[in-house]
Amino acid sequence: MRHKIMSICFMLTVIGGGSMAIVRAQPEDSTQQAAVLVVYYSRDGHTHTVAESLAKKFNADLERLIDTKNRSGAAGTSSAGKDAYAGALTLLEPLRHDPQRYDVILIGTPGWFGNVTPAVRTFIKENSLAGKKIGLFGTVNLTGIESALAQAAKLIAGDAGGKIPTLPLRKRDLKDDVLAQKIDRFFTEFNRADAAATQRAGTAADAAQ
Ligand SMILES: Cc1cc2nc3c(=O)[nH]c(=O)nc-3n(C[C@H](O)[C@H](O)[C@H](O)COP(=O)(O)O)c2cc1C
């Protein structure tokens, strides 16, 4: 009898040990890489260059926003500035990627007189970003990118927008070596940023819409 009880205890220990091994395996599964999408608008190609480099660094998919309104030539440039200043929305071509499938979304815009472009404003307005970790990047020739990104952050997260990591760039930052350095630093800071705070920011944006 004593022998039988000891055998049962032995079996339970083996089975228990086996199930513990399964439990220990779970954290490895949960370390799968987050899905990252880089969404951006670029009229003249500068923000596009940055978006491509970011996508390589973050191993991300790329979604270039296409504004159906003509933004080229003198008339297009003039209405672009006016629309950005007025906070106008626009009509975008359909997206190729579903933002809801991504955990992390990096959003990029040129600065137009210190404002976010209508294309990016429209993307933010039309897509729920709740529960996502957000980063912002953008380019200008010289001035106004900080205010454009702050505006985008506020659209996304209201008063919590200041917590969203940003990568503001000027034309002089787009040289290969400088850009690579800035992107490396942004990557490190972004991964250090408080994901929970950013997610709360996304939720706040949803409430604001
Ligand atoms: C309507 C409009 C307004 C702009 N306003 C500014 C500005 O206020 N400050 C600045 O330095 N560059 C300004 N620019 C230049 C762009 O921000 C800059 O060239 C940017 O890198 C363009 O990005 P893209 O090449 O991705 O379109 C403006 C360009 C346009 C078309």
Image (cartoon, rainbow, N blue to C red):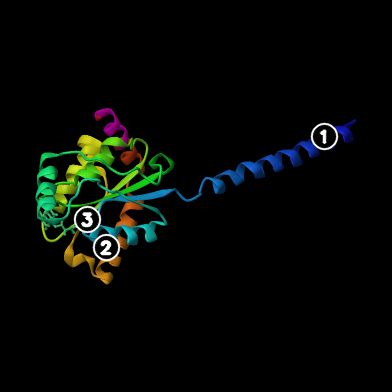
Q: Is residue 57 visible?
A: yes
> What's the distance in space between the residues labelled 3 and 1, CA to CA?
73 Å
Residue marked by disc 3:
43
Going by the image, does 45 lie left or right of 188?
A: left
Q: Is residue 35 above or below residue 186?
A: above
Q: Does the magenta run of residues contain 204?
A: yes
Give the residue type at disc 3: Arg
Disc 3 or disc 1, which is closer to the eye?
3
Task: Determine whether, in the image, residue 86 is placed left or right of residue 25.
Answer: left
Mark 2 = which residue?
182
Comparing labels 2 and 1, the label whose residue is closer to the camera: 2
Taking the image as shown, residue 18 lies to the left or right of residue 153, namely: right
Task: Identify residue for label 1.
Answer: 8
Q: How many marks are shown on the rendered structure? A: 3
Point out residue 88 in the picture as x, y percentages from the top left corner. 16, 39
Q: Nearer the viewer, residue 156 or 188?
A: 156
